[in-house]
Image (tube, grey):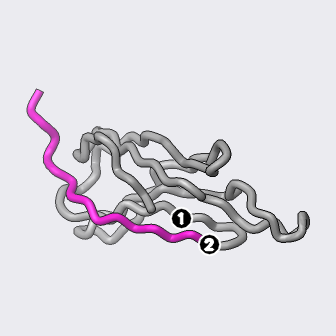
Amino acid sequence: MVELHESSLHPTGVVHLSADFIWETCEDTGGTSRAASDVTVTITPSASGEEILLGRPIPKGERSTVDASFDLPADLQTGPAILALRTHSGDTIDVELPIDITTAPAT
């Protein structure tokens, strides 16, 4: 499960998320689990449907935890979007979280 922490969900903002047990089964060690080796965090605005890579976090610690913040692009479209954490090696994990991107506050 992905947990969204205090974030600024607007263009040029920051999204902070965490998730535990982001691992894969290691066949060369008899099927034991280890931290996933290929993890991506993406955002897909509903308006464009175009997936934007925010980063490739590395799970750490005993619980293979991802706990990271990612900068949102300046040209990010506002409105509904999907924030996703996926693994691309071993046992795949594909978690999506619906969010709303708002207009950046006036400066």
Q: Residue at x 34, y 64 (%)?
A: 97
Instruction: Find disc 2 in the rendering and name its residue.
Output: 92
> Residue 94 at what x, y percent from top left?
51, 70
Quick check: marks 2 and 1 in contact, CB under 8 Å? yes
Around disc 2, counting alpha carbons within 10 Å, would you say few (fewer than 14), some (14 to 19), or many (20 or more)?
some
Q: Residues within 10 Å of mark 1 (few under 14, many from 20)?
A: some
Please determine whether, in this image, residue 88 is positioned above or below residue 39: below
Q: Quadrant of the C terminus?
A: top left
- Is residue 98 shown in magenta? yes
- Which one is nearer the viewer's eye here, 107 or 27? 27
For residue 104, side relative to residue 38 (left or right): left
The residue positioned 21% from the left and 54% from the top of the image is 101
Which residue occupies the foreground of this view, 47 or 9? Answer: 9
Which of the 4 quarters of the picture holds residue 50? bottom left
> Magenta part of the protein: which range?
92-107
* Relative height, residue 3 to residue 86 (above, below): above
| Residue at the left extreme of this rendering | 106
The image shows residue 69 at horizontal and vertical percentages of: 43, 40
Residue 94 sits inside the magenta stretch: yes
Q: What secondary structure is marked by label 2?
A: loop
Q: Please identify the residue farthest to the top as the structure is shown.
A: 107
Q: Residue at x 54, y 57 (%)?
A: 40
Q: CA distance from mark 2 to mark 1?
A: 7 Å
Number of on-image labels: 2
Q: Earlier in the sequence, mark 2 or mark 1?
A: 1
Which of the 4 image quarters holds residue 83? bottom left
The residue singled out by tag 1 in the image is: 86
| Quadrant where the N terminus is found in the figure | bottom left
Q: Amino acid at mark 2?
A: Thr
